[in-house]
Image: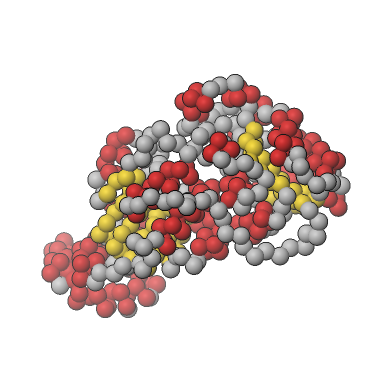
Amino acid sequence: MKIRIVHLIESVLKIFPWIIYIFLDNIFLRKKYLKKLLLYRPDLFESYFAWKPIFFPEKILVIIKTDAIGDYIIFHNALRVLCTSEKYKDFKRILLGNEVWNDLATGINSDIIDHFIFINRNQFQNPADSYYRIEKLLDLNVYSVHTSIYFSHSRENLSGDWIIKNLTSSNKIGSKGDCLCQTYLERKIGDNYYSKLIEIDTNITFELIKNKIYVEKILGNQLNNFHFDLQRPKFENDFKEKYFVIFIGASASFRRWPIENFVFLSQFLIRKYGNKLVFCGGNEDSESVQSIIYQLPKDLTLNLCGKESLYNFLGIVAGCELLVSNETSAVHIGVGLHKKTVCISNGNHYGRFNPYENFGFQDVKTVYPDSILTLTEEQRLELYANGSTIDISVISLDAVIGSIEALLNDYNL
């Protein structure tokens, strides 16, 4: 009996989907407690969402980017170019993103994005929590989406291809990409969900360049003025003197240079340059920073770990004289703000996210283990493009100091 009722409702929606348009879009979904009822039986309305773009077409662009903070920062300029292009400037633009960079995205991109939807990646990718995925999908499917773009060169199943598969969009664009986050079979299956797949030469590895080519192929024209540049936010602080920013955190342990090295480095910076040192990172880094500050002059140090939003951190970096950081999102922020930046890296994803200096960025120095430096560029790409297990602690203090001095060789003491 229940199956017959479901089939009857589906049949009605297929033939007369507009019957419930006013009810569903303007009444049902405006009430959160009623919306939850829909989430328990989304199959009843699949036909409606599939037909809606045909009967109620709208110029809506959905851009999907659910990667980490650093990926979003590198993607920032591509997003601006897409949204302000002749092709999409008259569209209503929706960004589906990762909640970890919520305040940064809303802070610097509210002028080009009409509506933000953020997901918790862990919850979204939990196979047991289909309710959360369907709820987020419903937030998108209430719109009559004309074009959807999954902006990732390493597509994922649940936070990318699954959305594209179930999103009611007339045009679905994705990257042929690589298999870093999928098996070959998973990617082949996912390819079927797209109306257009963009292929980029595999010899091109640097993410910024791949983003540029991806946007060019979407828009159908060459971009001559594609720059990596973050908008500088208006930022006021109590720093009356010059300061350096030290970022000791990283998402993985293999990216974290030893704390004792940061102690010696901090002592050197104060001794030679005399600038204030502002330590930044997450809440989890605060205790380690305190152990560093304990060994330094208190009037020349400040611990801001976990105390500033990501958007405010952008402002802190914008005002600094130098940024020293493990290989993490802070490096991309420093480069995007054209600040003198030293990146300490074990070579992870070599050629994709670093070294910036190989691509014309003159204010960046990336410090690698000696074992990487002795290799040719071709060997580095072959061995470390997809990851590195080299212990970052083998990078010497002298190597980092040498890079800092090279950047600050004309610094006015």
Let me know if residue 201 appears in the view. Answer: yes
Q: Who's the residue at 15% across and 72% down the image?
A: 16
User: Taking 104 as reference, is 204 left or right?
Assistant: left
User: Taking 112 as reference, is 2 left or right?
Assistant: left
Q: Who's the residue at 64% across and 24% down the image?
A: 370
Residue 44, how many percent across, how many down? Answer: 23, 64
Residue 87, how many percent across, how many down? Answer: 34, 61
> Residue 53, located in which quarter of the rendered image?
bottom left
Let me know if residue 262 appears in the view. Answer: no
Q: Nearer the viewer, residue 28 or 241?
A: 241
In the picture, the quarter occupied by the N terminus is bottom left
Residue 230, how many percent across, how many down? Answer: 56, 55
Residue 108, how many percent across, how many down? Answer: 54, 62
Q: Who's the residue at 53% across and 50% down the image?
A: 228
**Eyeballing the image, is 247 above or below 22?**
above
**Eyeballing the image, is 130 above or below 4?**
above
Q: Who's the residue at 36% across and 60% down the image?
A: 62
> Residue 46, located in which quarter of the rendered image?
bottom left
**Eyeballing the image, is 23 above or below 88?**
below
